[in-house]
Image (cartoon, coloured by chain):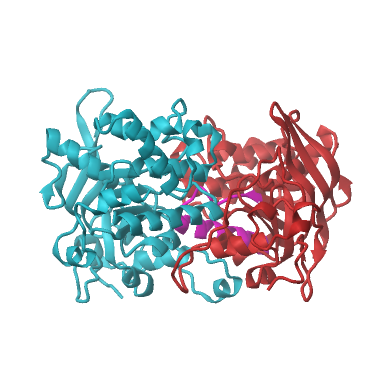
Amino acid sequence: MSVTESETITATEVWSPVDAGELLLEVEDLSVAFDTNDGVVQAVSDLSWELRAGETLAVLGESGSGKSVSVQAVMGLLPMPPGRIAQGSIRYRGTELVGASNSVMREIRGPEIAMIFQDPLSGLNPVYRVGWQIAEMFRFHRGLSKREANKKAVELMDRVEIPNPGVRARQYPHQFSGGMRQRAMIALALSLDPKVLIADEPTTALDVTVQAQIMELLTQLQAETQMGLVLITHDLGVVASVADRVVTMYAGRAVETGTADDFYGAPAHPYSRGLMASVPRLTGELGRLYSIPGSPPSLVHLPPGCPFHPRCTYAIDVCATTRPQLEPVDGRSGASACHRTAELP
Amino acid sequence: MTELVDAVTAPSPRSETDARSDEPLLDVEGLVKEFPITGSLVPGRRLGAVQAVSGVDLKVYHGETHGLVGESGCGKSTVARTILLLEKPTGGFARFEGRDLFSMRGSELRRARRDIQIVFQDPFASLNPRMTVESIIEEPFVIHGLLTSSERQARVSELLDLVGLSAEHANRYPHQFSGGQRQRVGIARALALEPKLIIADEPVSALDVSIQAQVIGLLEDVQEKLGIGYLFIAHDLAVVRHISDSVSVMYLGRIVETGSRDDIFEHASHPYTKALLSAVPEPDPQLERERERIVLTGDVPSPADPPSGCRFRTRCWKAQDLCAEDVPDLVDRGAGHPVACHFPE
């Protein structure tokens, strides 16, 4: 990126450059609850993960598993109330973000941790030109003049491979296709050289050929900038080739963590196994797809014990009474929250 | 439920193998649908046309599934809506059990509409929130003046049972159900009049992976029991591979390749099919690293102004001058696997 520290005018705390493999983001024992008329929704419970520079962490889960809420908490974007962080800590390079003041969050959100969303239209203002919106980042955070900021915006649009960036910068979001809008969102997110990029279902709204383009762009940009990338997705295929580590969530909890190769090679937790078996594939044997019986539990009335036990084919008596903790799995770096990890075939 | 199964199978015991060679259930030929673009200043003045469907041929056989795949905006849903006579076709023919669908009027048309049903993509938008599940499933009988009220009730509980819901769900409202359960209600409604053909327009794309597998399984079960033909419209190639006997690939209003499941998934011949297949991410990091990915550049052109000649040529890596001049016909080069390309593989 062409913005250098010397051009930084706004008096913000200047973070030191990131070392290779430096620990950037830590989420520890995070619990997020929403107070609703129907009761307390336990959206996220005891979630922990960490992210290092240059690393890609995939947070996998179905709708309602708490994956988006957990990153909204990181970004300070939770609607509070009704949401609240019941416990836990979120640290960016050692700085606590839970309860941090707005001014601290403003320095971090954008310049340090940026986010892109599933629906790029909701992230772009429909009444301003796309180039102007990207340039705003340079004007607001870096204090550049209009002319300089516009020039940088066009450069950035070129970098995310938007064809004719000069013309496109003067167009409005509705004149962009879905893929181009997502590219514009990525440009917006990367404008201030963030150290961490959180992508919440970045390709879910896109066609498969465009999805391939966007994933390629993201991995290529990550390789150039060595930023840490958190990919939130429900699609097991999308992250398979790009993730270094995977956290699988179910009913607000991490049920399995581990390297992508371990996870995809042989998932440990019964839920991860069920999920992998129910994905239709392009190659391999045809036949009936496996499906996990039942549906995910209500987050207001979570079952006692293991949240997955009512749907689990391996469940035994203890699963209904005691909640399993994340325990290391033999022969690999990950962990699984299952009483029967060692016994599973 | 056995009663319903008998009722369907008893009067016309279909021997699928005979029907296959004889007469397709649905035979669409040269279907064209254009939407006029009219000026806002001079009402009624025609400025052009969105060429949503430009000459599509399709065949669906009794008890078989024909998959129609393509990216958003390729016209696949317009094909569905036109076959259902929800849109008036601009040109072409459709024969349902040998009778011309587009010239039907009055009672003949009402009869055909009983035999052709649809399952929609969005189970949240396709069920009336103010109607109980019972009245939703019962409504087809009411509209067509079939059965007495008590017979209808009995049939509703049979149908609920068939789709894996229980009779006690009958008095609930759609908002009390999860997405997967709602889609089951939508399927029960489509099955109510014992149709011969169900058009399923992206029936599982709004559902989570584990629920998606359940609904695919249900559709397969129902087909096995009742011998219904499916036109299965989807953008997810892996899902289509699992459920379809034969497949057509659509691009910008035209079918570019059609054939058996193996023809398309094992021996794809059109560059677009190949690109589409290679863009689908597989949940297997090793496979992902090894496979060669064709990443298409750019977006799908506007159907209001499609490219001359082959409509895929603007994104095709094999395109030559010929492709801009001549529209490639969907021709069978032997082996019953027609491809619309000047340079097929």
The x, y position of residue A300, in whole percent, is 71, 37
Chain coloured cyan? B
Chain coloured red? A
Q: Is residue A209 magenta?
A: yes
Which image quadrant: the C terminus of chain A? Answer: bottom right
Residue lying at 53% horizontally and 52% vertically, measured from the top left: B211
Q: Nearer the viewer, residue A68 or B311?
A: A68
Q: Nearer the viewer, residue B128 or A303?
A: A303
Residue lying at 54% horizontally and 59% vertically, measured from the top left: A291
Q: Give the range drawn in magenta.
A: A199-223
**Vertical arrangement, residue A104 with respect to residue A217, above or below:** above
Residue lying at 44% horizontally and 59% vertically, measured from the top left: B239
Is residue B343 among the parts visible in the rendering? yes
Which image quadrant: the N terminus of chain A? Answer: bottom right
Q: Which of B120 and A10 is in front in this view?
A: B120
**Vertical arrangement, residue A161 with respect to residue A184, above or below:** below
